[in-house]
Image (cartoon, rainbow, N blue to C red):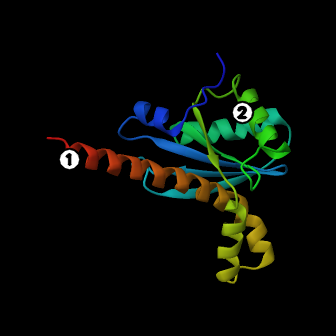
């Protein structure tokens, strides 16, 4: 069975009331990792995995998902500014295809355009040194990606509740 790639709507039909999601920002040298609280309101940066070999990376990621009791992964998909997929998006999809033998968690892709730039801008505004920014940017980008998905989940829930209030 291949890794299940779901839309956000499909994920919502399967989510238990309380379950954590893990957010990933896949880079060529690092993997930023973030986790949600069980009510899926807040994304928090967890760590940055230094990329080695795929198996070693997955072992570290697997340990995190088990420790956090994650239900699914939200993986940043680095689209081009025009919405097309380039080499980085293809590398992300390849990474996910290779997950199958190691992690049995559903995956949703989340548009991550400008996530690292937004996080870097925030860190600069906070007067973080270049060294500090380099140390935290990947896991903070993962939290930014995951928070975007969490915010969308909340909006969908609110819209659904409003829709049912309006029914006779």
Mark 2 or 1: the one toward you: 1
Q: Position of residue 101 (x, y in %)?
A: 71, 22
Task: Name the quadrant of the C terminus.
Answer: top left
Other residues around mark 1 within 10 Å, as few (<14) / some (14–19) / many (≥20): few
The quarter holding residue 57 reads top right
Residue at the spot x=66%, y=59% of the render? 141
Q: Position of residue 132 (x, y in %)?
A: 74, 73
Above or below 94: residue 28 = below
Q: Do the residues labelled 2 and 1 touch (CB within 8 Å)?
A: no
Residue at the spot x=55%, y=50% of the render? 35
Residue at the spot x=74%, y=56% of the render? 81
Q: In this view of the protein, which residue sits in the foreground, 1 or 68?
A: 1
- State left or right for residue 163 relative to residue 144: left
- State left or right for residue 102 relative to residue 156: right
Secondary structure state at the residue bearing disc 1: helix
Earlier residue among tags 2 and 1:
2
Which residue, given by chain and number where applicable, does mark 2 sit on? 96
Residue 146, numbered label: none
Q: Where is residue 22 in the image (x, y as percent from the top left)?
A: 57, 45
Which residue, given by chain and number where applicable, does mark 1 sit on? 166
Secondary structure state at the residue bearing disc 2: helix
Q: Position of residue 53 (x, y in %)?
A: 86, 37
- State left or right for residue 147 relative to residue 91: left
Q: In this view of the protein, which residue sits in the foreground, 164 or 87?
A: 164
- State left or right for residue 134 relative to residue 150: right
């Amino acid at each position: 069975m291949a890794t299940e790639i779901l839309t956000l709507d499909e994920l919502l039909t399967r989510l238990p009331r309380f379950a954590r999601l893990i957010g990933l920002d896949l880079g060529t040298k690092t993997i930023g990792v973030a986790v949600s609280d069980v009510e899926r309101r807040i994304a928090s940066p967890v760590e940055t995995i230094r990329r080695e070999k795929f198996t070693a990376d997955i072992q570290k990621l697997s340990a995190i998902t088990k420790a956090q009791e994650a239900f699914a992964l939200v993986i940043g998909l680095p689209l081009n500014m025009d919405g097309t997929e380039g080499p980085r998006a293809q590398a992300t999809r390849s990474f996910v295809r290779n997950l199958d033998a190691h992690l049995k968690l559903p995956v949703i892709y989340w548009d991550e355009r400008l996530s690292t730039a937004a996080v870097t801008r925030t860190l600069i505004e906070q007067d973080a040194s270049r060294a500090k920014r380099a140390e935290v940017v990947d896991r903070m980008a993962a939290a930014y990606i995951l928070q975007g998905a969490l915010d969308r989940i909340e909006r969908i829930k609110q819209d659904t509740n409003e829709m049912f209030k309006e029914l006779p």
